[in-house]
Amino acid sequence: MRQAWKRTSTVCLCLVTLAGLVGCRQLSPEEKVEELRSRYTARINEGGFFLRDVPVEPVDPVDSEESQGTISGGAETEGSEFGDVPVEPVTRQELLLDIIVQHDSDETLPGITVDLEMSDASGNVKKRWRKWVETEGLPKANQKQVTETLIDVGYEEGDRFNAEIRSPIPPEERSDYREFAGSGG
């Protein structure tokens, strides 16, 4: 009986040691970044976008009296054979998107690449972006909100936005993710 217990305790000790060695294996720099990335989450803040049209300066303004004039009230006009026609202001679409990033690790990355996606009302992806968010020193379980400005996105009523931290990142795509830059991946 005593020998059976001794043999059992030896086998258990070997199994515990083996499990400890497997669990304590040194991670490569790429594996370490990947492991830390998996501890982050990102999302769009509820109601977290604002769309605006921003006036843009004309690329090649014409300052000739023949081609421009002013009508009462100060509106800009452009001369034509049919008389003065009001000139529509040139604008570009800017979308301000609130992104929330959080992690649940005692160790942080200097920043994280967030994958953003815009889909139409049917769920078909229209555009994708990758945005860097600084996270160094972000305490565990705390959130960081950043506002990202996206220009000329082609937003239409019903479009939706999604933010995510992809993990794992295939080795062939790691050069697109800034956090892998110092890891050799």
Image (spheres, rainbow, N blue to C red):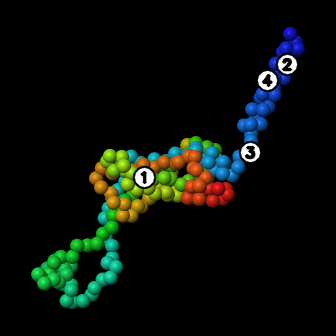
The quadrant of the rendering that contains the N terminus is top right
Instruction: Kindly report the distance in space between the C-alpha atoms of the residues bearing marks 3 and 4.
Output: 24 Å
Question: Which residue lies most toward the top here?
Answer: 1
Instruction: Kindly report the distance in space between the C-alpha atoms of the residues bearing marks 3 and 2.
Output: 31 Å
Mark 4 or mark 2: which comes first in sequence?
Answer: 2
Q: What element carries label 3?
A: loop
Which residue is labeled 2 in the image? 7
Mark 3 or mark 2: which comes first in sequence?
Answer: 2
Q: Estimate how packed mark 2 is, as few (under 14), some (14 to 19) or many (20 or more) residues with alpha carbons within 10 Å.
A: few
Q: Position of residue 64 (x, y in %)?
A: 24, 89
Mark 2 or mark 1: which comes first in sequence?
Answer: 2
Question: Which residue lies most toward the left here?
Answer: 82
Mark 3 or mark 4: which comes first in sequence?
Answer: 4
- Please tell me which residue lies in front, 108 or 27: 27
Which residue is labeled 3 in the image? 26
* Amino acid found under the numbered disc labelled 3: Gln
**Residue at x 66%, y 51% (from the top left corner):** 30
Q: Estimate how packed mark 4 is, as few (under 14), some (14 to 19) or many (20 or more) residues with alpha carbons within 10 Å.
A: few
* Amino acid found under the numbered disc labelled 2: Arg
- Identify the disc placed on residue 117: 1
Residue 95 in view in this figure: yes
Q: Where is residue 159 in the image (x, y as percent from the top left)?
A: 33, 51
**Residue at x 76%, y 34% (from the top left corner):** 20
* Amino acid found under the numbered disc labelled 1: Glu
